[in-house]
Image: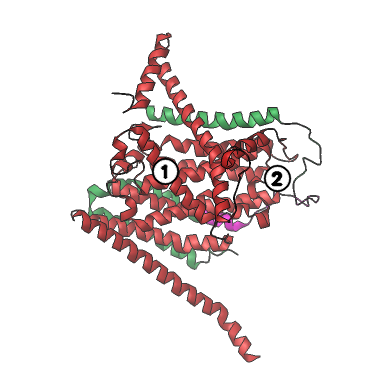
Amino acid sequence: MSFWNDPLKVAADWLEGVFMGWGMDSVFAHVLVAFLGVFLLIALLMVLDIFLVWIERKVVARFQDRLGPNRVGPYGLIQPFADIIKLIIKEDTTPGNADKVVYNLAPILSMMSVLILWAIVPLAPVMLGTDLNVGVLFLIAAGAIGTLSIIMAGWSSNNKFALIGGFRQVAVMVSFEVPMLTMLLIPVIFSGSMNMNAIIQDQDIWYFLISPLGALIFLIAAIAELGRAPFDLAEGESELVSGFNIEYSGMKFGMFYAGELLHAFTFGGFWSILFFGGYRFFGLEQVSPFLAILILIIKAMLGYWVIMWVKYTMMRIRIDQMLSFNWKFLTPLSFVLLLVTALMNALLASAPTWLYIVGMILANVVTGWAALEIARSATRQERERVEGPKQAAEVSH
Amino acid sequence: MSEWIYVALFIAVGLIIPIGAIAAGFILGPKKPNPIKEATYECGVEPVGEAWIQFKPQYYIFALVFLVFDVEAVFLFPWAVKLGQLGLYAVVEGIIFVSILIIGLVYTWRKGMLEWL
């Protein structure tokens, strides 16, 4: 086993040998090495996070026909470091009548809820934090901590805008968790496992090809979970100023901001893992784990770019529209799609691969088309119901 | 069980890094609090009334509806994992189970609980 094929294990074994040479207990040495590995991964993620600030600003600038940061360093690459220095040396004010403990805990939990998601991300066939056999459930559980941190921030600030923003964000997250849960079941049905690595290994055909509608609904639910436009009513600048993080300043605000960006990138990664084959790309992942990591990061960046694309294209929707869209359209549709997928999967279990793919795509297209037709006719009826009396009143004048 | 040690390590490091960053800000930043700076932000004017008030009951109703579907997920995940081996019989059972939930959703809908008042 060479360093090129399994760098993590070689490095860990070597380090463990060094530590045990110093007279350490073997269990303690193992845990210490694991701790250093986790610390290294999270430190690299934080460095990536710094550059995500630059990427986000550069991309939004291009969408809005601007140049973006371009003064500090080549292409403005040093800009995020300047921002961090500014955030660190800013005064950290706490509102006088805030609930101090909860107020200070919220940004820490917000960042932590994102960082622990990387425990289940398989970076390469042999490189992963931990091979949890309930990975999909862990993804949902970690998301719940993020929801908790937002309600904590909104409530403890003792500010009306923050409170409304916090409640709205929780309403969004709680609602869109249902379609998200349902769409997480689709990769589980195909692969027969809740383990992220097993889901990737099973994707000889990308799940996007056999469940395009599922991938789309997962993306919509993920955007809502992230609290990004068009579902960013928790921080609607025009009405709530900044929403749940309004009273935060300095590095505490920085944690919310960095956490949001990393969360978006992480969900881009999960989208690619669940529906686009993760680190797999026509056998290239077998060459070296380093190549596999590169493939995963490129796919995650593309997913992140799609999330940004949606954010800077769509307008913000109202909370009643958002809840109607979720409970009256997305939730029933996701349940029907789940049942259709389960049924087709069982019926086509012994069919040849091409027939399986065609049947699955057909089932998805028919389900999506029928849902859109039902929604369209319901909207037309609603419009006639609302506009009917008004037109009659105009005629009588 | 050893897998969960890694999760514990991720939680520990995930707490240490933000605490470290916030502590760095706390140490390096100036600390000159005064009552006006610590006042609650309300568009630059004096805050009016309490912020910790009773909130809209609608949020609570949506949370209740959500709870039903969240509990249901506990039953659907094992079903989805073993679906490939159980065949058509399990699919029909799943359809019946989800249909009951959808009837519940339709009932909530007809009762007008999904309207934002």
> Mark 2 or 1 closer to N-term?
2
Q: Which residue is mark 2?
A: A158
Q: Nearer the viewer, residue B117 or A354?
A: A354
Q: Is residue B24 left or right of residue A382?
A: right
* Callout 1 secondary element: helix
Q: Amino acid at mark 1?
A: Ile
Q: Is residue A385 above or below residue B103?
A: below
Q: Residues within 10 Å of mark 1 (few under 14, many from 20)?
A: some
Q: Report if residue B50 lies within the magenta region.
A: yes
Judging from the image, mark 1 belongs to the subunit labelled A
Chain corresponding to green in the figure: B
Q: Residue at x 45, y 72 (%)?
A: A376
Q: Main secondary structure of the magenta part?
A: loop
> Could you say which is closer to the camera, residue A59 or residue A141?
A59
Could you tell me residue A31's position as x and y percent? 43, 21
Quarter of the view holding residue A301? top left
Query: Residue at coordinates 60% horizontally, 30% vertically from top-left?
Result: B19
Q: Nearer the viewer, residue B1 or A376?
A: A376
Chain of the residue on which disc 2 is drawn: A
The 10 Å Cα crowd at callout 2, few under 14, some 14 to 19, many 20 or more, is: many
Could you tell me the amino acid type at mark 2? Asn
Residue A227 visible from this viewpoint = no
Q: Farthest front residue?
A: A74
* Element type at mark 2: loop
The residue depicted at 52 percent of the width and 32 percent of the height is: B14
Residue underneath mark 1: A298
Nearest to the eye among marks 2 and 1: give it. Answer: 1
What span is colored magenta in the figure? B42-63
